[in-house]
């Protein structure tokens, strides 16, 4: 993206001043922005109020003496053309139209109203929307949800849906994902998905792009933007409206031309985009990309604290497109020196439960086990499945926290060696015991989860999520590194 275009977008993501037009005592935008660094340069507009949240409220944006870079328009749809005209008169550089009730309704008069908005704005102001949540940018303080984290991160999100954008902004904290920019662009009568793709592909603060898209008005330009973006960084996409009914819903949601699922799948394959099937897989895959290198092959080793899932774990990997190969003879020989014989299975998946509890085997720890497996030439990635934390708590009794901290320390040592020294990804599966009646059981699970997250490992609450995320990493690595 050329320098002048980057400068145009700077007023969107890093505005010096913001006005909320249609502010009220309970609106989300005012509440969100009042809790960020933008508060000092935030101006509220609504003729019904003199003051909101102890901040002066203006009757019109034209009454504000200061310059305004960015406006959030949250007024009834019929008032948008007038308000937009006042923004242009004020010299506002960009506006986000939150207001809905335009072409997405399918009504002729509402389609005409949207065209009127477009005509008013064309060439005079940059528009996001209408019918969208706008921008969340932790660095500048722009936000559409007061519960969003102020933490900056590497993930850029482009979402045609406001709900998906909100889910990322709020659920990201739970999944340990942080963001550079989250963009909800709605009906896209001006700035569209390709515009934001082009920007994020050149944005040094964005390392991975997550995309939720329902349709496009310009397939050729979208294809070009996707191809450019994937040459620079991973792009993971969820296409909404892949069924006939979903396509109809997409049209009524954001007035989009959804197209056939085959066309979209072909588009994503041709441009190197990793396509996923649902929101959870999108978030899980993005998490994996933030923490892990792509595996250089399909071979996976699963290390468990219980052998009960070994058969289904293997089946799940193979069904996903991965492989669970047997260890090499040298690996097995060395493992036998560490893993006790009784009650274990020195195979892949590896059931080595005794050294999870006793920490030390005959001549080493679980860290040594992980390092041995990481060195096996047929193993390209590891999944560590800790599914018995509640049982560990019962075994260790009053000393559980001490033993868990020791186990975490040893596990992290082996996992860091695998990822940082050998260059192979490690996925952690830690079911959170959400249905346990004991608060301590949930606390111990969270304690282990947070310890691995602190050391920048992707943690998943189900084995299926771990496997799908790993396979998507493999797909990306194959597309760009093994062709």
Image: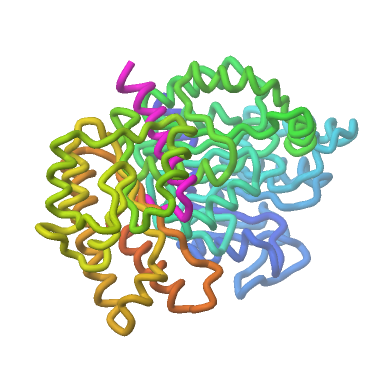
Given the current orientation, which residue lies at the most extreme front position?
A: 342
Q: Quadrant of the C terminus?
A: top left
Residue at 75% x, 39% y is 253
Side of 452 where 417 appears, left or right: left
* Residue range of the region highlighted in magenta in the rendering: 458-483
Q: Position of residue 85 (x, y in %)?
A: 72, 41
In the image, 472 versus 97, the foreground residue is 472
Given the current orientation, which residue lies at the most extreme bottom position?
A: 398
Q: Main secondary structure of the magenta part?
A: helix
Q: Quadrant of residue 88?
A: top right
Q: Position of residue 461 (x, y in %)?
A: 47, 55
In the image, 408 versus 213, the foreground residue is 408
Is residue 114 at least partly visible in the picture?
no
Q: Is residue 364 above or below residue 472?
A: below
Residue at 29% x, 59% y is 353
Magenta stretch contains residue 480: yes
Is residue 20 at least partly visible in the picture?
yes
Residue at 77% x, 40% y is 81
Circle count: 0
In the image, 27 versus 342, the foreground residue is 342
Q: How was the colour assigned to the protein in this rendering?
A: rainbow
Q: Position of residue 436 (x, y in %)?
A: 52, 72
Side of 319 where 92 appears, left or right: right
Residue at 28% x, 81% y is 399
Q: Quadrant of residue 279?
A: top right
Q: Position of residue 334 (x, y in %)?
A: 12, 45
Magenta stretch contains residue 137: no
């Amino acid at each position: 993206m050329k320098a002048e275009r980057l400068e145009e977008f700077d007023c969107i993501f890093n505005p010096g001043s913001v006005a909320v037009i249609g502010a009220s005592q309970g609106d989300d935008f005012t509440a969100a922005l009042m809790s960020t660094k933008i508060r000092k340069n935030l101006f509220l507009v609504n003729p019904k109020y003199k003051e909101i949240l102890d901040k002066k409220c203006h009757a019109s944006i034209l009454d504000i003496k200061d310059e305004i870079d960015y406006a959030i328009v949250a007024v009834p749809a019929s008032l948008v053309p007038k308000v937009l005209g006042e923004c242009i008169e004020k010299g506002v550089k960009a506006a986000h139209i939150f207001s809905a009730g335009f072409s997405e309704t399918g009504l002729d008069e509402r389609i005409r109203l949207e065209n009127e908005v477009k005509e008013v704005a064309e060439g005079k102001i940059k528009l996001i929307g209408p019918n969208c949540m706008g921008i969340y940018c932790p660095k500048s303080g722009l936000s559409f949800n007061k519960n969003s984290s102020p933490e900056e991160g590497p993930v850029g999100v482009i979402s045609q849906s406001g709900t998906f954008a909100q889910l990322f902004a709020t659920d990201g904290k739970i999944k340990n994902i942080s963001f550079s920019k989250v963009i909800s662009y709605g009906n896209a009568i001006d700035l569209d998905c390709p515009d934001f793709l082009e920007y994020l592909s050149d944005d040094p603060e964005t390392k991975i792009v997550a995309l939720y898209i329902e349709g496009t008005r310009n397939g050729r330009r979208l294809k070009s933007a996707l191809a450019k973006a994937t040459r620079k960084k991973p792009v993971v996409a969820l296409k909404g409206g892949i069924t006939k009914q979903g396509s109809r819903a997409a049209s009524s949601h954001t007035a989009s031309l959804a197209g056939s699922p085959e066309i979209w799948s072909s588009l994503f394959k041709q441009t190197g985009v990793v396509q996923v099937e649902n929101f959870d897989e999108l978030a899980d895959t993005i998490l994996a990309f933030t923490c892990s290198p792509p595996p250089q092959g399909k071979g996976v080793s699963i290390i468990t604290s219980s052998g009960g899932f070994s058969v289904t774990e293997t089946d799940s990997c193979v069904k996903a497109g991965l492989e669970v190969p047997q260890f090499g003879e040298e690996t097995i020989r060395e493992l036998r020196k560490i893993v006790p014989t009784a009650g274990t299975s020195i195979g892949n998946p590896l059931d080595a439960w005794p050294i999870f509890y006793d920490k030390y085997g005959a001549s080493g720890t679980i860290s040594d086990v992980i390092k041995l497996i990481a060195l096996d030439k047929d193993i390209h990635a590891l999944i560590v499945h800790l599914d018995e934390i509640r049982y560990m708590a019962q075994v260790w009794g009053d000393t559980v926290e001490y033993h868990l901290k020791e186990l975490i320390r040893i596990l992290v040592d082996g996992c860091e060696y695998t990822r940082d020294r050998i260059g192979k990804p490690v996925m952690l599966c830690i079911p959170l015991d959400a249905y346990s009646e004991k608060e301590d059981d949930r606390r111990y699970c969270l304690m282990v989860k947070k310890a691995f997250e602190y050391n920048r490992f992707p943690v998943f609450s189900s084995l299926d999520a771990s496997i799908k995320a790993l396979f998507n990493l493999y797909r990306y690595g194959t597309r760009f590194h093994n062709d």
